[in-house]
Image: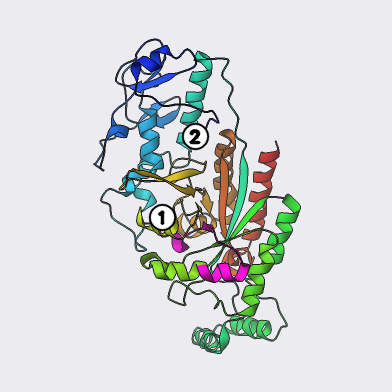
Amino acid sequence: MLGIDFKLTIDAGFFKKHEGPKLSYTNAPLEEELFFTSRGLLFETGIAEQHISVFDHNSNKVFFATGKASALPFDVFAASFYLVSRYEEYLPHIRDVHDRFSAEDSLAFTNGFLQKPVVNIWTQWIRDLIQKKYPTLIFNEKKYEFISTIDIDNAYAFREKGFTRSVGGYLKSAIKLDVAEIMDRTRVLLGLKKDPYDTYEFQLEMIKKYKFKSIYFFLLGDYGVNDKNLPIESKKFQSLIKMLDDYAQIAIHPSYGSNKSKEQLKKEVERLSKVVHREITKSRQHFLKLTLPETYRNLIDLDITDDYTMGFASQVGFRASICSPFNFYDLDMELETNLKIHPFAVMEGTLKYYMNVHREDAMQKIKPLIDEVKAVNGEFISLWHNDTLSNQKLWLGWQAIYEDMVKYAVETRNN
């Protein structure tokens, strides 16, 4: 994260002979080097309940306290590993209705630091200590980046649904006596009105206007209770994927049903690959269904190299307490993998459905997250959906919030 090369050694003699910048991570300092006390977690095998007491240091939360000899009053490497590896998600815990680890059960939420990328902040502390001790050492500063990600769970509200689903939609509206929806569906199907979920023109306008990186995650699962996108056989759907592929990156959005079936996951990845005529390497789980380590192992087996699921559904902030990409470490296997994890910080559905944030207050929740990421030169990733940009019904006014967020994120990047 600091952009410098380093060597690791367990040879005390070799360490003492080295005349350049050096630090030790052990029980006691060897000489006059920069010394960090180890609490032992990183030298353990297996997974065990950790007794954690969180306290304040430099106006931020820390844990795994150490003695006064250490350069920092806590084991910064063990604490970082605990958070980034998602150690707590391997321990016994109650899962929510969608079989997910809940934000409210996390160490970060219960101790009030979920909205802070503390691992990045701690890394800056380490950099400052090294620079003070070894002022000639040069660090390659990382640059802040903004990435907009869009999940396409349902490409169109009324179009391309086929006869059976369209008739079912009419019957559902009739039972609810929703005359307006019946009229809207009819106008869309007759080509007299644009489909309300067809917000792609607006999205491309934003990309052109603000010049930011965007990734689209397409749900291509078989139809089910929680998987209701269009059938991949739809030529219009395929054309949409190809069109967006010209302006942004295309990725798979593994279905709710694929979480327990590697065969289903493989089928969905192959479907998208066939449409765009190349390998698919990026992914984000539908409903953010993430079970460690199984979900990531399945992705690795299918040659997925980058995943964007790392975030909570019910709270905004930093699930792994970091806003930089990192390689997934499989705790069960004691193995660092090549799967790159990209944590996201905010989802519009979290603000509206879980946190009950009114649209007028949404930017007050989003801006501080962008500020935190910018302060540590991290990667700010947002998660939105094509239907929430419709500017209609439940999502009236949220299109403007998306643009406000993009504008603030891009302006922050350029400053």
Tag of residue 111: none
- The reply to whether callout 1 and callout 2 are in contact (CB within 8 Å) is no
Between residue 194 and residue 365, name the one nearer to us: 194
* Residue 277 drawn in magenta: yes
**What's under tag 2, amino acid-wise?**
Asn
Query: Crowding at label 1, few (<14), some or many (≥20) Cα neighbours within 10 Å?
Result: many
Give the SS element for disc 1. Answer: helix
Q: Residue at x 73, y 82 (%)?
A: 192
On the rendered image, what quadrant is the C terminus found in?
top right
* Image quadrant in which you'd find residue 13: top left
- The spot of residue 186 in percent (x, y) is 64, 86
Q: Is residue 115 above or below residue 258?
A: above
Magenta-highlighted residues: 270-291
Q: Secondary structure at mark 2?
A: helix
Residue nearest the viewer, comparing 413 with 273: 273
Does residue 257 appear in the picture of this structure? Answer: no
Cα distance in 3D space between marks 1 and 2? 23 Å
Residue 95 against residue 371 in the figure, above or below = below
Residue visible at 56% across and 49% down in the picture = 381
Residue at the farthest right position: 209
Which residue position holds label 2? 120
- The type of residue carrying mark 1 is Tyr
Work out whether residue 152 can be spotted. Answer: yes
Residue 20: percent from the left, percent from the top?
Answer: 49, 15
Q: Position of residue 54 (x, y in %)?
A: 34, 32
Figure colour scheme: rainbow
Write down the residue under mark 1.
296
Mark 2 Cα-neighbour bin, 10 Å: few <14, some 14–19, many ≥20? many
